[in-house]
Image (spheres, coloured by chain):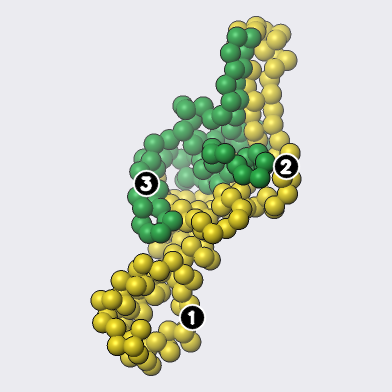
Chain colours: A yellow, B green
Amino acid sequence: MKELGFDETIILSKINASDVDFDASISALSKLKEAGVSSEVIALVMQKAQFSTKSKTGIYYLAADDTLKPILASVFSGTNQNAVAQQLVSGLINAKVKSQLPKRTFNNVINSRSPEFTFIFDPDTGADNMQNFQGDGPGLFN
Amino acid sequence: MRVKKSNNLREVITSKSNMFTGSNGIDPKASLPFKIETIGNNKFTVVPESLEPGEYCFIYQGNVPQGRTNQSVFDFSIK
């Protein structure tokens, strides 16, 4: 766009409106610099590369060092039901089905009481964005 | 939503029933309020209101495509 003579404001608007996987590698950025692209445009490309939906689908939290760290999904390891205990005590109390997650704590420890999460979805994906750790087979873990 | 610690596990109540009534899904008492803001195409910022130290997760409650049931959550710990 720079070579075609587009104004910097238009280039910035185009980058902001584009949902593509920007290449923010050192070599790609140096090519932009050599082509005379402004620092503002390069900074926006770097920012957009960090938030690209094409490569970053998932849930992230903002870590103390201002980087986005992914929250990986955990799969329920089983369920527990107290229906027998309910029948023994009284049919009036609630029988609860509890889905269980392994371990008492998770590895993703966040030290902030008001963490900021970023949800990134890719509408082009054929699978469900929130379920893509389960493979494609229906009822894989059922 | 908040996740309850139990022995060597964490638990999410997904169903309740007694001899008269039954309900499926997440207990509204365990769900937590949050602010959501659109920051770009298909990108959202979610900020829960002040979280006490403990175990939490994001759980998907919509209809799951391709006949799968919801078997996973995005979990994290607050210290």
Q: Residue furthest front?
A: A4
Is residue A7 at all visible to an observer of this figure?
yes
Residue tagged by mark 3? B36
B34 versus A59 height, above or below: above
A107 versus A68 height, above or below: above
User: Percent x, y for residue A2?
Assistant: 33, 86
User: Crowding at label 2, few (<14), some or many (≥20) Cα neighbours within 10 Å?
Assistant: some
The amino acid marked with disc number 3 is Ile
Tell me if label 3 and label 1 are in contact, CB under 8 Å: no
A111 left or right, relative to B6 = left
**Quadrant (top left/top right/bottom left/bottom right) for the C terminus of chain A:** top right
Is residue B72 at all visible to an observer of this figure?
no
User: Percent x, y for residue A131?
Assistant: 61, 48
Labels 3, 1: one chain: no
Q: Which sits in the foreground, A6 or A130?
A: A6
Residue tagged by mark 1? A25
The amino acid marked with disc number 2 is Gly
Q: Which chain carries label 3?
A: B
Which disc number belongs to residue A139?
2
Q: Using the rendered view, name the quadrant where residue A31 is placed.
A: bottom left
